[in-house]
Image (spheres, grey):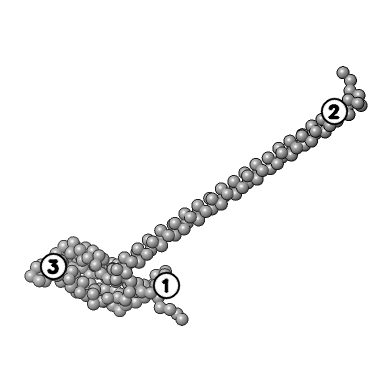
C-alpha cells in the first residue's frame, strides 16, 4: 500500500492531533513529576520543621522541669529558714533542746562572727557562714553523730562539718554524774543564703 500526497492530506489532521496529544501527554508527565518533586520537598521541609519543633518542645519542657525543681528547692530552703537572715537565737535554743533530749553529758560552743562565703557562684544571692567551735563530752561516738544529724535536720541553716577530732578522755572525766569516755572538738559552719543587696 502506497501513500501519496492526497493520502497525507487526509491524515494530516490526525497526525497533528497525535503530535498535540503527545505534547500534552509529555507536558502532563513533566508537570506531574514536578509536582511530585515539589511535594517531596515540602514534605522534607515539614519533617525538618517538625523535628525542630519537637526539639524546642523538649528543651522547653526540660527548662520547665528545671524551673520547677529549683522552685521546689527554694521553697524547701525558705521553709527551713536557710534563706534569710541568720537566726542565732534559734540556733542556741536548738542546741539546748538537742542537749536535753539526747541527754548529752556536756556541750560547749562558741559562734564566730558571720562572714561571706567565698566562691559561692551565685550573683543574685549572698552565701553567709558562721563558724561554730564545739566541745562535746560523750559516752560514745553515736552522741556526736546524733547531734550533727539533728542539727542538719532541724537547724535554720545548712550545717557543714569542717573538722572533728575525737579522743579518749584521760582517766574518765565526770560530767552530770556520768563518766565521759570521749571528748570531741569540732568546727562546724552554719550557712545561710541572703538575697544579694542591689549595687544601685
- Which residue is most to the right? 5
Q: Is residue 56 above or below residue 122?
A: above
Q: CA distance from mark 2 to mark 1?
A: 92 Å
Question: Residue 195 vs residue 146: left or right?
Answer: right
Question: Residue 129 vs residue 2: left or right?
Answer: left
Q: Is residue 166 above or below residue 54?
A: below
Q: Which residue is mark 1?
A: 124
Camera-near label (1 vs 3) is 1
User: Where in the figure is residue 176, as x and y percent of width and height?
Assistant: 10, 71
Q: Which residue is mark 3?
A: 103
Question: Residue 104 vs residue 130: left or right?
Answer: left
Residue 11's label in the rendered image is 2
State the residue at coordinates (85%, 30%): 12
Task: Describe the element under mark 3 as helix, strand or loop.
Answer: loop
Q: Quadrant of residue 4?
A: top right
Q: Nearer the viewer, residue 186 or 92?
A: 92
User: Where in the figure is residue 97, as x and y percent of width and height?
Assistant: 17, 71
Quarter holding the N terminus? Answer: top right
Q: Quadrant of residue 107?
A: bottom left
Q: CA distance from mark 2 to mark 3?
A: 122 Å
User: Where in the figure is residue 18, as x and y percent of width and height?
Assistant: 79, 32
Amino acid at each position: 500500500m502506497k501513500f501519496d500526497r492526497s493520502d497525507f492530506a487526509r491524515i494530516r489532521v490526525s497526525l497533528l492531533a497525535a503530535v498535540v496529544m503527545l505534547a500534552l501527554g509529555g507536558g502532563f508527565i513533566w508537570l506531574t513529576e514536578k509536582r511530585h518533586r515539589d511535594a517531596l520537598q515540602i514534605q522534607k521541609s515539614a519533617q525538618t520543621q517538625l523535628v525542630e519543633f519537637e526539639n524546642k518542645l523538649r528543651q522547653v519542657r526540660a527548662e520547665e522541669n528545671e524551673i520547677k525543681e529549683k522552685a521546689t528547692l527554694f521553697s524547701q530552703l525558705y521553709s527551713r529558714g536557710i534563706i534569710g537572715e541568720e537566726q542565732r537565737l534559734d540556733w542556741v535554743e536548738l542546741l539546748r533542746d538537742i542537749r536535753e533530749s539526747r541527754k548529752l553529758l556536756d556541750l560547749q560552743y562558741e559562734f564566730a562572727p558571720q562572714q561571706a562565703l567565698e566562691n559561692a557562684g551565685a550573683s543574685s544571692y549572698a552565701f553567709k557562714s558562721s563558724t561554730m567551735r564545739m566541745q562535746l563530752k560523750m559516752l560514745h561516738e553515736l552522741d556526736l553523730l546524733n547531734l550533727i544529724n539533728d542539727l542538719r535536720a532541724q537547724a535554720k541553716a545548712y550545717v557543714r562539718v569542717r573538722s572533728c577530732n575525737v579522743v579518749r578522755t584521760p582517766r574518765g572525766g565526770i560530767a552530770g554524774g556520768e563518766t565521759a569516755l570521749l571528748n570531741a572538738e569540732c568546727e562546724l559552719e552554719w550557712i545561710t543564703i541572703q538575697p544579694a543587696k542591689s549595687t544601685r
